């Protein structure tokens, strides 16, 4: 009786295994219709589901990217997928968009969860990149309370997740932790100069608090952390309405509208192309255990905003004029990373020159504008990337009256919230 029973069980088991094997064969993408294959499996992706053996491949990881639908996050997700990892993107789509996933949304190793990082989430992951937080002043000042919460509560929730899963965790901090810096260029050892009650404070102080939380988790819970201080980065997939200087200038130039220069345009920034930055992220995540950062990641080539405007006009061939507007409060006067630490520890430095990065960014926005049926004023890419000498002459001759009629509120002249009590800004984004 026992023998008969054993034989039946063995039979069932072998049937079941053969069903499984059959199912796996059916699931293999090579028998799917060609069109479906191409849509579903971008280049480099040859499995319907990661096979068990694939998951055991050395170096294979399940990686969480918070803020993965945003500008930097989407480039990071794409790069991680190309490296053969499984990527889980968590995003509440405040500033991110699904269009940013074009080209890899159907990749079977990619998963998206709509979730606000202010609330805990339970996942099993090997690594975490914590990027969730609006980055442009227009977006983070839209709901400053939510911005602080995202930085602080988001960090606490992700650190908690890293503690439970023993995952290595990367944090996207910012050059804004240096505020309006009194030391130039900025080294990681500089503690910063931030106005705690200014309009940028929600972002700057939120990020500073997040950094301190990361180092507390190391001291208290021996977490493996990596903290990057990111300087201004630009490239395709920037939000067209984020109000940042590169996206504003490029769109304005393409539409033939005046380029809005805040203040006299003599303030400086250092612009890093997105591919260079993402390379820095990956090197930092893969760096030796003892190296935690914070480490500056940015391009050390410094430009005035006026120089940037000239460059955009030159590359687009646009004849847009310049329109000087008041400088926003607490707008940092200068910013340039000292990247010695990144060079020595990570062997990293940016490679893409401003002009080359601008061309790729302009092509992106040009396509975006054309797709949205808004006629672009300048036909970019048709051999008219000539220098716009008229504009250059005007800016250099000082014919534009620098600072005229401006209310320079930068250095403590006027803070919109001083004397007015609390800022009453609230919105549906406030949880
Ligand atoms: P982004 O606004 O394009 O992306 C941020 C992403 O986070 C968006 O997809 C947004 O929807 C998501 N998000 C915002 N709040 C969230 C929340 N509560 N829960 C879940 N998702 C949320 O900005 P970015 O330029 O890609 O910046 C990414 C990170 O890098 C940010 O943390 C930012 O502070 C940092 N950073 C960026 C720059 C830069 O120049 N782009 C410079 C310094 C630091
Ligand atoms: N800026 C400008 N015109 C614009 C947008 C921004 O002159 O249309 C200036 C802004 O005042 C700041 C610099 O460009 O001095 C960079 O602004 P951005 O918002 O891109 O980044 P951040 O101030 O956070 O570095």
Image: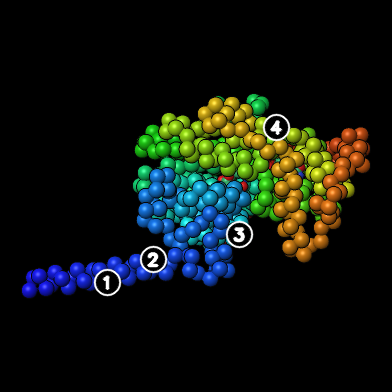
Q: CA distance from mark 3 to mark 1?
A: 41 Å
Q: Residues within 10 Å of mark 2 (few under 14, many from 20)?
A: some
Q: Which residue is under mark 3?
A: 102
Q: Residues within 10 Å of mark 3 (few under 14, many from 20)?
A: few
Element assignment for label 4: loop
Q: CA distance from mark 4 to mark 3?
A: 31 Å
Element assignment for label 2: helix
- Residue 63's place in the image compared with 93, above or below, is above
Is residue 299 shown left or right of residue 407? left
Q: CA distance from mark 2 to mark 1?
A: 14 Å
Looking at marks 2 and 4 on the same chain, the residue that comes earlier in the sequence is marked by 2
Q: Which residue is under mark 2?
A: 24
In the foreground, 421 or 138: 138
**Residue name at image x 39 percent, y 57 percent:** 51
Q: Which residue is under mark 4?
A: 301
Looking at marks 3 and 1 on the same chain, the residue that comes earlier in the sequence is marked by 1
Q: Residues within 10 Å of mark 1 (few under 14, many from 20)?
A: few
Pointer 3 residue Cβ closer than 8 Å to ligand 1: no
Where residue 313 sits: x, y (%)? 83, 44
**Residue name at image x 46 percent, y 59 percent:** 47
Is residue 14 shown left or right of residue 325? left
């Amino acid at each position: 009786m026992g023998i008969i029973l054993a034989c039946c069980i063995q039979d069932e088991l072998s049937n079941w295994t053969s069903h499984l094997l059959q199912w796996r064969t059916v699931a293999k993408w090579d028998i799917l219709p060609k069109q479906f294959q191409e849509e579903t499996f971008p280049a480099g992706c040859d499995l319907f589901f990661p096979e068990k053996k694939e998951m055991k491949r050395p170096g294979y990881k399940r990686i969480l990217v918070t803020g993965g639908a945003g500008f930097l996050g989407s480039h990071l997700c794409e790069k991680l997928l190309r490296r053969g990892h499984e990527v889980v993107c968590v995003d509440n789509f405040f500033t991110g968009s699904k269009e940013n996933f074009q080209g890899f949304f159907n990749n079977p190793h990619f998963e998206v969860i709509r979730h606000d990082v202010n609330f805990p989430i339970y996942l099993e992951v090997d690594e975490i990149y914590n990027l969730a937080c609006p980055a442009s002043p227009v977006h983070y000042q839209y709901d400053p309370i939510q911005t602080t919460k995202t930085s602080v509560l988001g960090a606490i929730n992700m650190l908690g997740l890293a503690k439970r899963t023993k995952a290595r965790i990367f944090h996207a901090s910012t050059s804004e932790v240096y505020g309006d810096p009194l030391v130039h260029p900025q080294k990681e050892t500089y503690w910063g100069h931030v106005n705690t009650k200014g309009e940028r404070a929600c972002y700057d102080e939120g990020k500073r608090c997040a950094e301190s939380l990361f180092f507390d988790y190391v001291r208290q819970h021996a977490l493996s952390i990596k903290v990057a201080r990111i300087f201004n980065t630009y490239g395709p997939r920037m939000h067209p309405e984020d109000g940042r200087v590169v996206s504003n200038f490029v769109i304005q130039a393409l539409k033939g509208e005046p380029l809005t220069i805040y203040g006299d345009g003599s303030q400086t920034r250092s612009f890093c192309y997105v591919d260079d930055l993402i390379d820095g992220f990956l090197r930092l995540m893969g760096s030796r255990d003892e190296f935690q950062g914070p480490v500056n990641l940015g391009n050390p080539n410094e430009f005035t905003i006026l120089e940037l405007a000239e460059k955009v006009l030159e590359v687009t061939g646009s004849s847009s004029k310049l329109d000087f507007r008041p400088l926003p409060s607490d707008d940092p006067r200068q910013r340039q990373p000292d990247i010695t630490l990144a060079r020595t520890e990570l062997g990293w430095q940016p490679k893409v020159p401003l002009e080359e990065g601008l061309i790729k960014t302009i092509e992106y926005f040009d396509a975006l504008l054309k797709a949205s049926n808004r006629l672009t004023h300048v036909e970019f890419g048709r051999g008219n990337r000539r220098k716009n000498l008229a504009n250059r002459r005007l800016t250099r001759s000082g014919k534009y009256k620098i600072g005229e009629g401006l209310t320079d509120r930068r250095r403590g002249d006027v803070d919109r919230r001083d004397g007015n009590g609390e800022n009453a800004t609230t919105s549906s984004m406030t949880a």
